[in-house]
Image (spheres, rainbow, N blue to C red):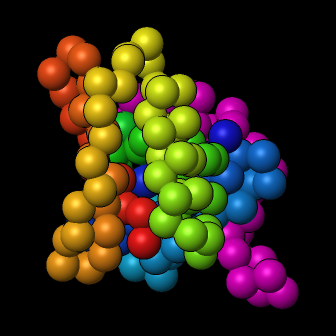
Amino acid sequence: MKYTMTCKKNTITIDTKTGDIYGDTYAMKEIIKSDLYATWDNVRKVWHSDNLDETINEFRQYLTRCYKLEVVDAEELSEEADDSSEAKATTETVKTAEAHANKTVSHTRLVNGNDGFYQIIYYTDGTSKKMFVG
């Protein structure tokens, strides 16, 4: 499972399957060492911990309150890294949106933002979600 954790403007990604921590880690290195019990792997240039899953489960409330710990879907990460056509990204976005909590998609809209295209997904319960496409 993948998580993101934010402190001020720095965000890191925590992968509990591999035990790796990556992202804007330099500013958060003391937090990573003290709260996640990780060590720096100089060869692979990532932080690594053998017991990330247990640590996150044990301190989930603390990490959520202090560092905005959030679960990240694997489809959303691969979607942002995907350089394929706009149509394929739109299809994946809708699939990701439909997979979220028992919500039904009423319609979607592709908009051009200042830094790229965004897919806005509207649900039947009145909520919406904005996702970066490319």
Q: Residue at x 18, y 78 (%)?
A: 114
User: Is 25 drawn above or below residue 2 in the view shown?
Assistant: below
- Residue 89 appears at what percent x and percent y? 53, 58
Q: Residue at x 63, y 47 (%)?
A: 74
Q: In the rendered image, which quarter is residue 78 located in?
A: bottom right
- Residue 93 appears at what percent x and percent y? 48, 46
- Left or right? Give the position of 101 relative to 91: left
- Left or right? Give the position of 24 relative to 118: right
Extent of the magenta region: 35-62
User: Is 44 drawn above or below residue 66 in the view shown?
Assistant: below
Say which quadrant the N terminus sits in.
top right
User: Is 81 drawn above or below residue 124 in the view shown?
Assistant: below
- Residue 108 appears at what percent x and percent y? 31, 41
- Residue 62 appears at what percent x and percent y? 38, 35
Q: Is residue 63 visible?
A: no
Q: Residue at x 29, y 56 (%)?
A: 110
Q: Is residue 104 visible?
A: yes
Q: Nearer the viewer, residue 128 or 38?
A: 128
Q: Does the segment drawn in magenta span residue 52? A: yes
